[in-house]
Image (cartoon, helix red, strand yellow):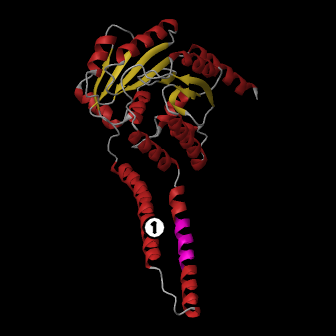
């Protein structure tokens, strides 16, 4: 390492040691949880004054989450609330929160606080040691069945091997992201961002911190199995086109087997004229390959759908209201303009 590089590293380390931190929290119908959320965040901030801003993104809640949050944080410093015009999804809520960050680093939290704030100390420590991304690795999950845990772990392993990304298993969106990574992430304009995959794709210096995930204190999970499967599908189609390549290979392999089967059938008929073809087997084979064709048409359709979403170039989300704990309220026109810009 030359002298100039060495100075740069020391300067970055010194900046991180004194840098400001933001919390980014997406919420959706969390009326039962927000009071505990604000209470625990404020308890943490008392001991950690470097957490200068808290950005909470309301992903189109149908209950009184947003108004309740306003009443809870009105007299507190550094809070900014963004309210989507409708439900755009957790990943876009995280994206909007990161786009609004002004601090030197941001920590992405879930509103249910299953990722305990005590772990944030370890994330900050690794950031101050010089790492740009510090992600939480879930060692255990309270209240989750062993089957669900194995399926989730299996998906992460499959995703890593299938896409070639250095995305470790059992890592969600709970992580600390430095300013350079935030600035790089803001350049993405994907309609359906897979946040943890995109951050892994960016590179930089990344390290993990193991922790035990707590059970949900109140309310119900806003990520049912249907949404988890949908998110998993977005993750795969966002980072690899291997399913399309495998479809071509399987199609060619099936065609080759069909030709060999036809040759065998001709010779069998010539050698044994009395041989009667099995109608049942033909029908089941037709059903099998028909289903296989429909499956891969669906795979192609998934990629085509993603292309369709991207070329429409619609705003990724629309911010209906922006509010700060100082009491300032942006006008509706300015807020809508931010949404159109994807800020």
Q: Quadrant of the N terminus?
A: top right
Q: Is residue 153 left or right of residue 5?
A: left
The residue lying toward the viewer, choosing from 329 and 207, is 207
- Asked which secondary structure carries label 1, the reply is helix
Q: Quadrant of the C terminus?
A: top left
**Which residue is painted at 53% across and 77% down in the image?**
258
**Which residue is painted at 63% across and 26% down in the image?**
131
Determine the image quadrant of residue 34: top left
The residue lying toward the viewer, choosing from 84 and 339, is 84
Residue 64 position within the rendered picture, expressed as x and y whole percent measured from the top left: 25, 21
Residue 324 position within the rendered picture, expressed as x and y whole percent measured from the top left: 33, 16
Give the magenta part as a residue range. Answer: 248-258
- Asked whether the viewer can see residue 174, the reply is yes
- Check residue 124 for magenta coloring: no
Q: How many discs appear?
A: 1
Is residue 77 positioned above or below 101 on the image? above
Q: Is residue 226 left or right of residue 272?
A: left
Q: Which residue is mark 1?
A: 288
Residue 138 position within the rendered picture, expressed as x and y whole percent measured from the top left: 56, 28
Determine the image quadrant of residue 24: top left
Single out the residue that lies furthest toward the left. 332
**Which residue is painted at 62% across and 18% down in the image?**
125
- Check residue 251 for magenta coloring: yes
- Helix, strand or loop: magenta stretch: helix
Residue 140 position within the rendered picture, expressed as x and y whole percent measured from the top left: 56, 27
Mark 1 Cα shell of 10 Å, populated few (<14), some (14-19), many (≥20) = few
Is residue 220 positioned above or below 313 on the image? above
Is residue 257 positioned above or below 143 on the image? below
């Amino acid at each position: 390492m030359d002298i100039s590089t060495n100075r740069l590293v020391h300067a970055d380390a010194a900046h991180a040691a004194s840098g400001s931190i933001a919390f980014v929290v997406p919420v959706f119908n969390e009326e039962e949880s927000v009071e505990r959320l604000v209470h625990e965040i404020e308890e943490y901030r008392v001991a950690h004054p470097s957490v200068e801003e808290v950005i909470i993104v309301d992903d189109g809640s149908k209950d009184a989450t947003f108004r309740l949050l306003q009443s809870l944080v009105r007299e507190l410093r550094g809070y900014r609330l963004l309210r989507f015009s409708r439900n755009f999804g957790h990943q876009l809520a995280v994206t909007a929160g990161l786009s609004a960050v002004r601090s030197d680093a941001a920590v992405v939290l879930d509103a249910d606080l299953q990722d305990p704030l005590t772990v944030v100390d370890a994330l900050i420590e690794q950031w101050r040691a010089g790492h740009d991304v510090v992600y939480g690795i879930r060692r255990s999950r309270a209240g989750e069945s062993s089957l669900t845990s194995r399926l989730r772990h299996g998906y992460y392993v499959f995703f890593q091997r299938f896409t070639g990304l250095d995305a470790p298993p059992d890592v969600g969106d709970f992580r600390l992201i430095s300013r350079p990574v935030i600035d790089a992430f803001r350049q993405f304009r994907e309609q359906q961002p897979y946040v943890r995959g995109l951050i892994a794709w960016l590179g930089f210096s990344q390290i993990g911190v193991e922790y035990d995930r707590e059970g949900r204190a109140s309310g119900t999970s806003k990520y049912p199995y249907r949404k988890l499967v949908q998110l998993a599908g977005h993750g795969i189609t966002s980072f690899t086109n291997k399913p399309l390549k495998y479809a071509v290979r399987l199609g060619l392999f099936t065609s080759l087997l069909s030709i060999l089967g036809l040759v065998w059938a001709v010779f069998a008929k010539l050698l044994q004229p009395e041989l009667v073809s099995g109608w049942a087997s033909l029908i089941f084979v037709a059903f099998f390959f028909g289903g296989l064709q429909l499956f891969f048409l669906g795979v192609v359709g998934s990629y085509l759908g993603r292309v369709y979403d991207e070329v429409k170039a619609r705003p990724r989300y629309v911010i209906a209201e922006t509010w700060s704990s100082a009491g300032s309220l942006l006008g509706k026109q300015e807020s809508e303009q931010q949404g159109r810009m994807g800020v």
